[in-house]
Amino acid sequence: MIFSSRKLVLPLNKFSLMLAKTYKEKLKSKSFIITTLLFSLAIILGTNFQAISSFAGSAFGGNQNQEWTIAVYDEEGSIAQALERQIGFVNEDITIVQSDADLSELEEQAADGSYDALLTLSLRESGKIDANYLSDSLIQSDLSSDLQTTLQTIQSNLAASRLNLSADELATLNMPVAFEHSSFSESSKSQEDLNEARGLVYIMIFVIYMSVLIYSMMIATEVATEKSSRVMEILISSVPPFQQIFAKILGVGLLGLTQLLLWALVAFASINISGETQNSGIYQFFSFSTGSIQTLIFGIVFFLLGYFLYATMAAFLGSLVSRSEDVQQMIMPLNLLIVAAAMLAFYGLANPEGSLITFTSFIPFFSPLVMFTRVGMLNVPLWEPLTAIFLTLAAIIIIGWFGAKVYRGGVLMYGNASSFKDLKKALMLSKKR
Amino acid sequence: MSLEIKNVTKKFGEQRAVNDLSLTIPENTMFGFLGANGAGKTTTFRMMLGLIDASAGVITWNNQPIGYESSQQVGYLPEERGLYPKMKVKDQIVYLARLRGMGKKEAEKELVYWLERFKVPDYKNKRVEELSKGNQQKIQFIASIVHKPSLIILDEPFSGLDPVNVELLKEAVHDIHQKGATIIFSSHRMEHVEELCENVCIIHKGSPVLHGEIRNIKRSFGKKNLLIDSDQDLTYLSDFPGVVKLKKRLDGVKLQIENEEVSQFILKEIYGKGFIRQFSLEEPALNDIFIEKVGASFE
């Protein structure tokens, strides 16, 4: 007699059940909600930086975007007049006040706050200007450098007039150099493109690096928790290890995408609300425009590849530890690989054509970051990223296959072991003879 | 519909965890699997479930190896607690039942039935880590049978339970057996096995030392137990011919004797020397057989 007869469960059903469970549970977890909120807050602060800093300025009486009044003591008077005329070209916010009072009196006035700073000027026989700048703080260094620049010009003009140069001759002397950057290498992009690409590539590298680091840790912890609570013995008798690994990886992957999407929405909304123009602040650095579409697509592809590669490794490493406390130690080598990849990528930002970068961009553990840097920064022939994508895919499949074997044995293995010796033991447990 | 284990051996490196084990467990039997700690019980269960492969030999259920295709027919209670500590009882039982092919509604209904039967209906929305060890064991048991499997493997189901709860669980196991399920379970507590099982297998260091119906095992064991309560000092009987073992009790002695005839000689010997309140011949307990066969102390 059959105690129960039910239709066969499709493997896909179990897989989607597991995926949904991983996703939902993590989505509801405190740590997820807190990190999402905290980072959203950081995004809002970052995109509204100027508004916030000017608000802080007015609220706390700081001198941000304010006018500066500088007392000038000049016995002779001619330099002070020249300075008063010319300072406006360099910094509109500085007002020069020439005072008849004597030096000690001015020092007192500067000290009690009537003036923001005191500048003492004198002209030597040789035509050299001596300036002494006195202010209550050393923070406003741009103020003193503006004054210095202006005085330098005045000194040059004085020297020129001593040499009896004409106005035209003077103009020639001060003419800026026409400096244009171009490259003899065909693969490099134009300077303009490069600056544009650098910002986007920089963000993408950072996003890939952080995601891989955070989410692969999450997967390893999840596996180790299931194992340490021994619920794994029930799971492993219900769902094949390969399906378990990929249900977790996809579940956490979807979670990651949800998080990134939320952040992108927050950033988008915040930028629109703050009304900051695209030409100010950080947007100058990260200018998005045509031509970045290709970079963006490669970025997404390499993001997914990097995630799957590292997540697969994290899953099987997680299956080797018995307690979730040991996870950190176990995935240390993995973290070192990601850090190395990120360092190579950041190095590649400055020097994308280096042979080290070219070589490592084909190694699966590095290519998601390094090859991406190359396609972002250079005009690389298409076969190169395609080869890297293919190699990384192959690595994912091999590691996934190998990982499932380790996982099957690893999850049944207990003890305070957390070394790579266990890898052999785990494989032995899962093999037939 | 039977579970066949044919010449199964499992080696871990040089060590043989299970050595040439052959068993047939017919459908709808209650089978006791006994062995000292480390005898190879858990390894055998894991091989039955298909979690690890045998180094040699085959295990089949309905003439097919047990694998993921048949997982909805199989229920498993691992020796150690295996539940998500932070998940609510309801969520995880339904999840585990669904992984084994049961519908969500049906799983919820079954869960309510079992929680009520085990007199803990209010645990439905509690997290497992909030429950006591014994109550966790009840949840663990529910997790292994909620999907109505036809083959149930219970590794130490009664550990950590108080006598009242042991009874509740025993009744449940008995009922499920009545409904047609094949149940294999291991225990260190011989009285549980004696009470529930018709068939047992005792394994020692990976090898089967005894296997068959409990009735036949006891009969073929030959030795009997003799209980005597008397005012006189009976310890001298340990040297009496035919007495294998003597154990002192509060009111007398418990003897293990070669066969039942010996009892009559003993009766003659002690008759008239003092008041005899009890003189009873008993079947050997499984415990005695186990100790003799395995040699370890479980007293």
Image (cartoon, rainbow, N blue to C red):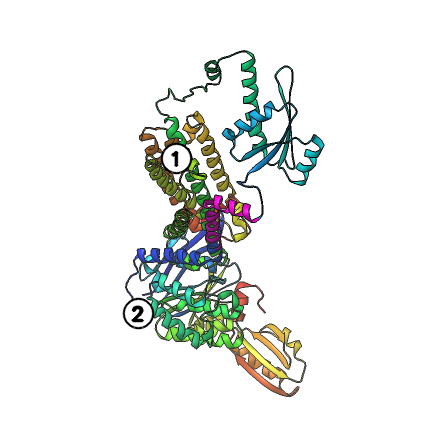
Residue A303, quarter of the rendered image? top left
Q: Does residue A418 appear in the picture of this structure?
A: no
Residue B118 screen position, x and y as percent: 45, 75
Q: Secondary structure at mark 1?
A: helix
Q: Amino acid at mark 1?
A: Phe
Q: Secondary structure at mark 2?
A: loop
Identity of the residue furthest to the left in this view = A7
Front-lying residue, A197 or A60 = A60
Tell me the residue at 53%/45% (across/down). A419
Front-lying residue, B8 or A252 = A252
Q: Amino acid at mark 2?
A: Ile
Residue B226 screen position, x and y as percent: 56, 78
Tell me the residue at 59%/23% (across/down). A79
Could you tell which of marks 1 and 2 lies nearer the N-terminus? 2
Please name the residue that numbered disc 2 is placed on: A2
Q: Are marks 1 and 2 on the same chain?
A: yes
Q: Is residue B262 above or below residue A9?
A: below
Residue A8 screen position, x and y as percent: 29, 61
Please name the residue that numbered disc 1 is placed on: A372
Q: Which residues are magenta?
A: A34-59
Chain to which mark 1 belongs: A
Crowd rating for badge 2 (residues with CA inside 10 Å; few <14, some 14–19, many 20+): some
Residue A295 screen position, x and y as percent: 35, 36
Q: Is residue A318 above or below residue A296?
A: below
Left or right of residue A292: residue B209: right
